[in-house]
Amino acid sequence: MNINYFEHIQAPILLFFQSIRNPILNLLFLFFTISTETPVVVIFTAIMYWCIDKKIGRRMLYALTGNIALNGAIKDYFKVERPIGKFGLESMRVETATGYSFPSGHTQTATTFWTSLAVQLKKKWVYVLAAVMAIGAGISRLYLAVHWPMDVVAGLILGFLFTILLIKIMDRSEKSGKYWEMILILVPLAIMAFVLKSSDYTKLFALMFGFTIGYILEREYVSFEVIDRKNMSNGEIIKKNGKRFLIGMLSLGVVYLGLKLVFSLFGAADGSTLDMVLDFVRYSAVVIQGVAGAPYLFKKMGI
């Protein structure tokens, strides 16, 4: 997608943010942008799902994996270039600004994360915090000059709307005990994988596919529960949840690295069809382990 015609309209906004940079604002907007990056989001959602509130956690995971897949599909389809290096812009934290520009992944992730949390907790202060964090993440991408304004607006809108849709789908699935809607929504995203033939998008779609399979397996065969806090001291709760988190994260590492080692024996070239298939299997397996495999270990180990 060629947006050169629109770049000169949006560039003054980025140049304005660049003109007001100072050490305090740098720290503030770096905080907003870092808070939406993969390690932070993965750790928090894992703790929520495994240790605090299973229902809230799995809706957050479903919304996140779905939005990540959608964001990747749109990026690879439109192929909008980032503003980095244009109009005299001095972009910051460019090492995390990979891939195409439209829509903003950080903004969409932040909107997804906070929307999914707010609509479930239904507390006024959470709604306010969610708005501040989502908008703050979006503005941070402009302040750092790694996205166009239209990228941020799209990320906010898509993150909010798709999150609401996915949570409604999961609500209906839990009430009916059927999964056809969750499976059906995978179809257009799977078609995009064949159309785009993108290695990056294949990995992102694998996350949502893996969550859907893991969710079904967990509901049908595992049915774990978070630790019952009744009659337990705070120390005991922290100890048990600490074990859960440690074992869960270690199991994810074993699956990821183990499959990477095994698949390396196939000698697939980067970007080849075989390489994309193996990546799809590996990333799907990691999410399945997180959603169903790790909880199965918790039950077997009595933690």
Image (cartoon, rainbow, N blue to C red):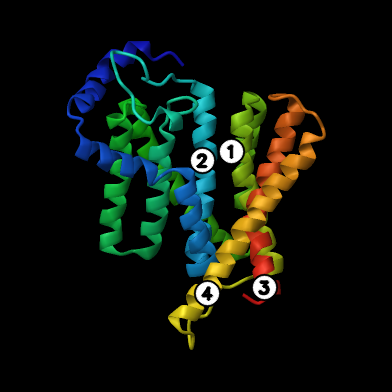
Say which amino acid is labelled 2: Ile
Compute the Cα span from label 4 to label 2.
Answer: 32 Å
Label ID, residue 68: 2
The answer, for residue 175, to whether it is visible in the render is no
Left or right, 24 with respect to 207, comes to left
Q: Foreground: 36 or 215?
A: 36
Q: Which structural element holds mark 2?
A: helix
Residue closest to the far right: 266
The answer, for residue 140, to whether it is visible in the render is yes
Compute the Cα span from label 2 to label 3.
Answer: 30 Å
Say which amino acid is labelled 1: Leu
Quadrant showing the C terminus: bottom right
Compute the Cα span from label 2 to label 1.
Answer: 6 Å
Q: Which structural element holds mark 3?
A: helix
The residue at which mark 3 appears reads as 299
Residue 245: x and y in percent read 56, 63
Residue at 47 percent across and 24 percent down: it is: 100
Of the two numbered discs 2 and 1 on the same chain, state the one appearing first in sequence. 2
Compute the Cα span from label 1 to label 4.
Answer: 33 Å
Q: Which marked residue is nearer to the observer: mark 4 or mark 3?
A: 4
Say which amino acid is labelled 3: Lys
Callout 3: few (<14), some (14-19), or many (20+) C-alpha neighbours within 10 Å?
Answer: few
Image vertical order of residue 131 relative to residue 19, above or below: below
Of the two numbered discs 4 and 3 on the same chain, state the one appearing first in sequence. 4
Residue 281: x and y in percent read 72, 42
The residue at which mark 4 appears reads as 239
